[in-house]
Image (cartoon, rainbow, N blue to C red):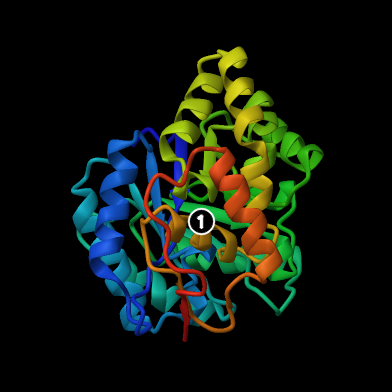
Amino acid sequence: MELKGCGTALVTPFRADGEIDEPALRALVSWQITSGIDLLVACGTTGETPTLSSEEWLRVIDIVVDESARRVPVFAGCTHNSTREAVNKTRRASSIAGLSGLLTANPYYNKPTQEGQYQHFRAVAEATHLPVLLYNVPGRTGANLEPNTVARLAEVSNIIGIKESCGSLPQITELLSIVSPDFKVFAGDDNIALAVLGVGGAGLISVTANEIPAEMSQMVRAALNNDWLNARRINRRYYRLMLANFWESNPIPVKCILARMGRITESYRLPMVPPTPGTRARLEKLASELGLLVHAPQEPGDYRMF
């Protein structure tokens, strides 16, 4: 499996009653693929996975795999701060026919040492026959996976790469200098994607691609083809949107904008809540300026949270 390009960390659409909106999720997956996206990630941070029951988590993965119909690789978020539970989740997800691989983040809250993280990720990888992408997101988990530890983990046969959301270009550059060129390093932050691609990254796993899959795919593809003029042009146009998606905790802004685009119902699960009125107004203004609001908006305040 040649893994590169632009992937989307999918949101999980909910209905107004708080249940998973399966038709909206299927429509979102189909739109992503026809727009040119190279990879889909179900049940990551952007998918509000901590609020899903284990049955819902599996159901979302099932839907994404089924709707994608092997047109693009699908990776499933598979994270827990207990190694035993992470291994159990890994085994359950690995039984889904057609799933391409797993994405697994640092154990959160525990703040394990580098050796603890090494042993954790190795145990997860050894519990599956599928390819594994590590996910370093210290801003969410409280633990940073250092380059030397990643290099050790890269020796595990089915650990094929990493989504790097450490936010540090020097750390990512160091990592790229010590791992094999076959080890896939994906940018995990939209706002530094071009920089990561410039130092040798394989692609981007994006939040912003939920809203503009065609444009983010074109940007990443241009950079990988050394067409930096076009890559920078797209980045310049949509850079404000990349930042706006983090004006409040992800995925609050991206779900707000997707709802205004008519793609989903604006429904959250606690502890995620709707954006403040001020943030909502700023998001709608920006989305309008970028020409994203092509569908009739909902009435103000037409959102739910559960």
Query: In the displayed structure, does residue 59 sit left or right of residue 193?
Result: left
294 and 242: which one is in front?
294
Helix, strand or loop status at disc 1: helix
> Is 188 situated above or below 20?
above
Residue in the picture at 30% in, 61% down: 25
Q: Residue furthest right?
A: 170
Point 58% across, 69% down: residue: 120
Q: Residue at x 46, y 60 (%)?
A: 125
The foreground one among 196 and 144 is 196
Against 121, is 240 above or below?
above
Query: Which residue is under mark 1?
Result: 257
* Residue nearer the viewer, 232 or 172: 232
Q: Left or right? Give the position of 3 relative to 61.
A: right
Q: Amino acid at mark 1?
A: Ile
Q: How many callouts does the rendering have?
A: 1
Regarding residue 255, the answer to whether it shows in the image is: yes
Q: Residue at x 39, y 43 (%)?
A: 39
